[in-house]
Amino acid sequence: MGAISIWHWLLVGLVVLLLFGGRGKLSGLMGDAAKGIKAFREGLKDDDKSGPSEGVSSLPRTDAEKEELKR
């Protein structure tokens, strides 16, 4: 008793493969988190460069807005 048997090592190995494997959920989650942080930092840099802009929307225009601009 108290010694780690082959079954303990197999169970630990299986858990490690599930968590950190090539298609593991944790590795995919960490990759998504890294992409989100990178996008957030790039967004902060863009805000600093562009400065305050009033009246300019970053959303796409609707058809009604496009028609109003044509007038």
Image (cartoon, grey):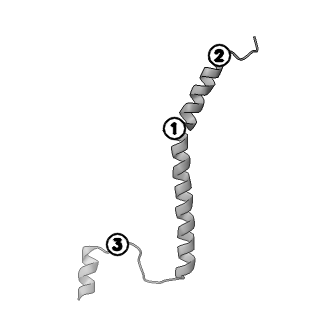
The local secondary structure at tag 1 comes to loop
The correct choice, above or below, for 42 with respect to 50 in the image is above
The local secondary structure at tag 2 comes to helix
Looking at the rendered image, the quarter that the C terminus falls into is bottom left
- Residue position for label 2: 6
> Which residue in the rendered view is the most extreme toward the bottom?
71
- Residue position for label 1: 24
The local crowd at label 2, few if under 14, some if 14 to 19, many if 20 or more residues have their Cα within 10 Å, is few
- Residue position for label 3: 60
Residue 54, position as x, y percentages in the image:
47, 84
For the image, the number of numbered tags is 3
Residue 41 falls in which quadrant of the image? bottom right
Mark nearest the camera among 3 and 1 is 1
The local crowd at label 3, few if under 14, some if 14 to 19, many if 20 or more residues have their Cα within 10 Å, is few
Residue ID at (57%, 59%):
37
Q: Earlier in the sequence, mark 3 or mark 2?
A: 2
Mark nearest the camera among 3 and 2 is 2
The local secondary structure at tag 3 comes to loop
Residue 62, position as x, y percentages in the image:
29, 73
Q: Earlier in the sequence, mark 2 or mark 1?
A: 2
In this rendered view, identify the residue nearer to me: 25 or 57: 25
Amino acid carrying mark 2 in the image: Ile
